[in-house]
Amino acid sequence: MFDVIAPVNASASSKTTADLAIGNLIQEGLHGVCLRAFTSVGTAQDEDAILPFLVAQVARIEAGQ
């Protein structure tokens, strides 16, 4: 009748908790989004990614370009 929720580690538990919390908000008539941002920062990012793009833009502005 019900799906069993059995996260296997702390990461899965936090994701499950967020999903349940958002689900409860939606049931109350609110809008909700669960965003799982990953690989948004790191040495492998090129300037096409949002954070490196913004950092490069600020650097250009500060350099007077």
Image (spheres, rainbow, N blue to C red):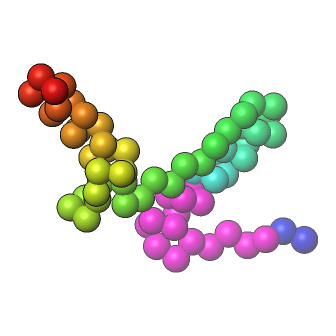
Query: Does residue 12 show up magenta in the picture?
Result: yes
Residue drawn at 17 percent across, 32 percent down: 60
Residue drawn at 29 percent across, 37 percent down: 54
- Percent across and percent down for residue 17 are 58, 54
On the question of residue 64 being in view, the answer is yes
In the image: residue 46, left or right of residue 5: left
In the displayed structure, 57 sits above or below 6; it is above
Residue drawn at 67 percent across, 38 percent down: 32
In the displayed structure, 20 sits above or below 60; it is below
In the image, farthest residue toward the bottom: 8
| Front position in the image: 52 or 10 | 52
| Front position in the image: 18 or 39 | 39
In the image, farthest residue toward the left: 63
Number of callouts in the render?
A: 0
| Front position in the image: 2 or 32 | 32
**Span shown in magenta:** 3-17
Using the rendered view, name the quadrant where residue 57 is placed.
top left
In the image, farthest residue toward the right: 1
Quarter of the figure that contains the N terminus: bottom right
Using the rendered view, name the quadrant where residue 3 is placed.
bottom right
Residue drawn at 29 percent across, 59 percent down: 45
In the displayed structure, 61 sits above or below 38; it is above
Quarter of the figure that contains the C terminus: top left
